[in-house]
Amino acid sequence: MTAWLAILIPLLVMVFALGMERLETRLRSGTVREDEVEDFLERARPDEVKALFRQGIGGALQLFRLRNLGKRGGLGPRRTKERA
C-alpha cells in the first residue's frame, strides 16, 4: 500500500502542475495590460465607452485599437498631392 502511495502522489502532483500550466497560458493570453486600460479610459470615444458596457473590456479595446491603427496605418482620410 505504501508503494502505491509513493508512486501515485508524485504522479498526481505532476498532472496537477501540467493542468495549472495550461490554465495559466490560457489566462495569460486573455489578459489586458494596465497601460492599455489607462490609455483607453483617457482617450475613448462615446461609442467605445458604450462597447465597454455592452461587450466588456475586450470588445471595447478592440474598437479602440482599430481606431488607433487607422490613425497610424494611414487608413484615415486621404490627402491629395498638391501640384506646383
Image (spheres, helix red, strand yellow):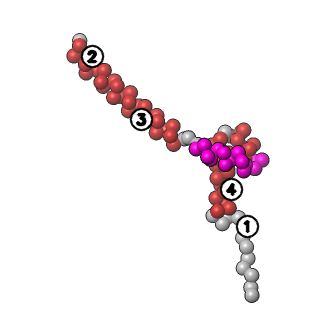
Q: Residues within 10 Å of mark 1 (few under 14, many from 20)?
A: few
* Distance from Cα at disc 4 to Cα at disc 1: 13 Å
Q: Residue 34 in the image: x percent, y percent?
A: 60, 43
Q: Earlier in the sequence, mark 3 or mark 4?
A: 3
* Distance from Cα at disc 2 to Cα at disc 4: 58 Å
- The segment highlighted magenta reads 33-47
- Residue 41 is a magenta residue: yes
* Label disc, if present, on residue 77 of the rendered structure: 1
Say which residue label 4 marks. 67
Kind of residue at badge 1: Pro
Q: Residue 54 in the image: x percent, y percent?
A: 71, 39
Total of numbered circles in the picture?
4
Kind of residue at badge 3: Glu
Q: Earlier in the sequence, mark 3 or mark 2?
A: 2
* Distance from Cα at disc 1 to Cα at disc 2: 70 Å
Prevailing SS of the magenta stretch: helix
Residue farthest along the right direction in this orientation: 46
Q: Quadrant of residue 21?
A: top left
Disc 2 is placed on an element classified as helix
Kind of residue at badge 4: Arg
Looking at the rendering, in which quadrant would you find the N terminus?
top left
